[in-house]
Image (tube, rainbow, N blue to C red):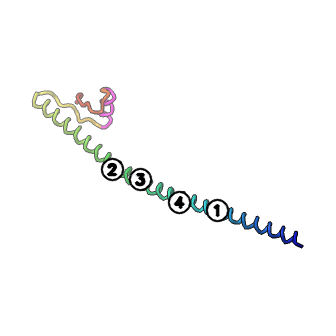
């Protein structure tokens, strides 16, 4: 009987030790899950910030295109007036397609010397 109670005591000690190891493992898992959640929340916040910045940049680029178009029209109008006052027959206003062709010919988006 003593040997049976000794074996039972050993089994109880092994079970207690295994339970303690399991508790430590669960604690480590909880810590890892909490860290992953923190990183996930940071990534979500970064994604929201990036989306807001992207939207802002898209709006700014649209306004920039409008200003560039206005500037191109002003340059065309000024050259037309200069040619008119010099007695040269003014060319037609450049269309978007003509501008693309002129840009391709000149190799520069900033050159409107053909107007």
Circle 2 SS class: helix
- Magenta extent: 96-105
Residue beneath disc 2: 59
x 31%, y 48%: residue: 60
Q: Report the number of numbered marks.
A: 4
* Snapshot quadrant of residue 49: bottom left
Image quadrant where one finds the C terminus: top left
For this view, does 27 lie left or right of residue 84?
right
**Above or below for 60 versus 114:** below
x 24%, y 31%: residue: 112
Q: Badges 4 and 2: C-beta atoms under 8 Å apart?
A: no
Circle 1 SS class: helix
The label on residue 24 is: 1
Residue beneath disc 3: 51
* Snapshot quadrant of residue 114: top left
Circle 4 SS class: helix
User: Mark 2 Cα within 10 Å, few/some/many (few <14, many 20+)?
Assistant: few
Circle 3 SS class: helix
Membership of 102 in magenta stretch? yes
User: Which sits earlier in the primary sequence, circle 1 or circle 3?
Assistant: 1
Q: CA distance from mark 1 to mark 3?
A: 41 Å
User: Which sits earlier in the primary sequence, circle 2 or circle 3?
Assistant: 3
User: Which sits earlier in the primary sequence, circle 4 or circle 2?
Assistant: 4
Q: CA distance from mark 1 to mark 4?
A: 20 Å
Residue beneath disc 4: 37
**Above or below for 82 versus 51:** above
User: Where residue 103 sits: x, y (%)?
Assistant: 31, 30
Membership of 26 in magenta stretch? no
């Amino acid at each position: 009987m003593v040997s049976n109670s000794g074996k039972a005591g050993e089994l109880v000690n092994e079970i207690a030790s295994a339970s303690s190891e399991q508790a430590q493992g669960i604690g480590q898992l909880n810590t890892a899950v909490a860290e992953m959640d923190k990183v996930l929340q940071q990534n979500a916040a970064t994604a929201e910030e990036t989306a807001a910045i992207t939207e802002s940049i898209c709006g700014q680029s649209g306004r920039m295109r409008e200003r560039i178009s206005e500037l191109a029209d002003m340059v065309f109008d000024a050259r037309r007036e200069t040619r008119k006052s010099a007695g040269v027959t003014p060319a037609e206003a450049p269309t978007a397609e003509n501008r693309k062709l002129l840009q391709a010919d000149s190799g520069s988006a900033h050159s409107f010397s053909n107007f």
